[in-house]
Image (cartoon, rainbow, N blue to C red):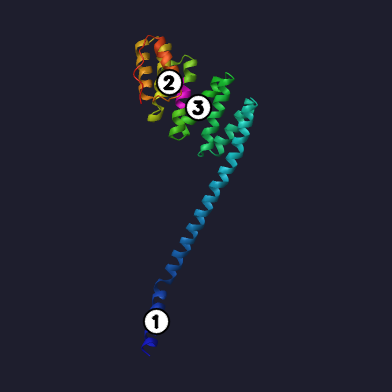
Amino acid sequence: MAYDLDEQEQLANLKAWWAKYGNVSTWVVIAGLAAYSGWNGWNYYQRNQAAQASVLFDELQTAVSAKDNTKVARVAGDIESKFGKSAYASLAALSAAKSFFDANDLKSAKAQLEWVVAHGNDEHKNIASIRLAGVLLDEKAYDAALKALGVAALPQFKPSVEDRKGDILAAQNKMEEARSAYKAALEAADKNYPGRQLIQLKLESIGGSVPEVKA
């Protein structure tokens, strides 16, 4: 009998609680379900966006291989405008910039690299700024080239940054500063750095001495 009374009391308490809080609880549950549904919907949206960007990126690579820079410009623009927050956008812009540079279309190459500097992640920004400095060097826009390098701050890019800085300074006939930049590039690079030998040759060609190899 005690059990029956306890059960009745529990039911009575439950009814009282539900009368007071039941509606609120229902809304909390519904809100939770909506959030869960929204999260799944957002994940689906992101996957769908990535899939579409991937298709366009493949189309871009085909155009680059065919040296069809008219199509390269169109597809790169589509990716940047529609999927600008995806990694595909920066990769597309970098690929397009290389294609334009190879075709000696420096204006278009700069525009693509500047887009990456403005919109890409840190790694892509660093890559783009170093390449942009190279394009500006070809245009003899030395001050702008040095300024572009200021964006590249990630430590893994320091050898490339200092190397490019040395090229710019050497082109300005600032040989002492160029030697310092090439030395800084070598000091920042380990012995397996791909461009190490070329940097050494450039340093030696302007009268610099090669520092000890970093282990």
Callout 2: 10 Å neighbours few (<14), some, many (20+)?
Answer: many
Q: Position of residue 167 (x, y in %)?
A: 43, 15
Q: Which image quadrant for residue 207? A: top left
Q: Secondary structure at mark 3?
A: helix
Q: Secondary structure at mark 2?
A: helix
Residue type highlighted by circle 3: Leu
Residue extending farthest bottom: 1
Of helix, strand and loop, which mostly describes the magenta segment? Answer: helix
- Of the numbered discs 2 and 1, the one sitting upstream in the chain is 1
Residue type highlighted by circle 1: Ala
Query: Which circle marks residue 113 in the picture?
Result: 3
Which residue is under mark 1? 12
| Distance Cα–Cα, label 3 vs label 2 | 25 Å
Q: Please name whichever residue, 188 or 215, is drawn nearer the observer in this view of the structure.
A: 215
Magenta stretch: includes residue 26: no
Q: Position of residue 125 (x, y in %)?
A: 45, 31
Q: Is residue 1 above or below residue 37?
A: below
- Locate the N terminus by quadrant: bottom left
Q: Is residue 149 visible?
A: no
- Of the numbered discs 3 and 2, the one sitting upstream in the chain is 3
Q: Please name whichever residue, 144 or 199, is drawn nearer the observer in this view of the structure.
A: 199
| Distance Cα–Cα, label 3 vs label 1 | 71 Å
Residue type highlighted by circle 2: Arg
Query: Which circle marks residue 196 in the picture?
Result: 2
